[in-house]
Image (cartoon, grey):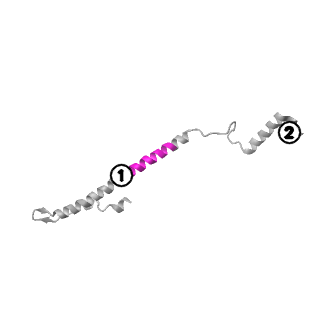
Amino acid sequence: MLSDKIKLTAKDILEKDFKTAMRGYKPEDVDQFLDLIIKDYEVFHQEIEDLRQENIKLKKQAESRTTRSTQPAPSAPNATPGTTNFDILKRLSNLEKHVFGSKLFD
């Protein structure tokens, strides 16, 4: 998680007080602090890149789902909505009787 990797907050940076030496700040303190800032920026950059990649992936998934849902689903020929297997078998039986007549029952 991003918050576990980040060592500094904006308040920490704002309130950071460097010790002064004879000619100003101690370079070692400044360098150590800047190293922490650099590490945080690297974490931020990587997190942003990961989120961008995830965003692209999710957009592609959403696009493919939208494309699939707009295409009509293949349906059975001559089937009406609400037709059950019983209705289909009944129609088939009636068709056989009509085509073959009494030959089926001989």
Nearest to N terminus: mark 2 or mark 1: 1
The residue closer to the viewer here, 83 or 106, is 106
- Residue at the limit of the structure toward the top, as seen here: 99
Q: Is residue 51 magenta?
A: yes
Residue positioned 26% across, 57% down in the render: 38
Where is residue 8? Give x, y as percent.
Answer: 29, 61
Q: Is residue 104 magenta?
A: no
Q: Which residue is mark 2?
A: 104
Where is residue 16? Give x, y as percent.
Answer: 22, 62
Relative height, residue 7 to residue 97 (above, below):
below
Magenta highlight range? 50-64
Judge depth for marks 2 and 1 and give the one in front.
Answer: 2
**Location of residue 86 by image quarter:** top right
Q: Residues within 10 Å of mark 1 (few under 14, many from 20)?
A: few
Which amino acid does the dot numbered 2 rest on?
Answer: Leu
Q: Residues within 10 Å of mark 2 (few under 14, many from 20)?
A: few
Label 2 – label 1 distance at C-alpha: 74 Å
Where is residue 60? Give x, y as percent.
Answer: 46, 44
Which amino acid does the dot numbered 1 rest on?
Answer: Ile
Residue positioned 26% across, 58% down in the render: 37
41 on left or right of 23: right
Q: Report the number of numbered marks.
A: 2
17 on left or right of 50: left
Type of secondary structure dominating the magenta stretch: helix
Q: Quadrant of the C terminus?
A: top right
**Location of residue 96 by image quarter:** top right
Does dot 1 land on a helix, a strand or a loop?
Answer: helix
The residue closer to the viewer here, 28 or 91, is 28
Q: Which residue is mark 1?
A: 48
Q: Quadrant of the N terminus?
A: bottom left
Does dot 2 land on a helix, a strand or a loop?
Answer: helix
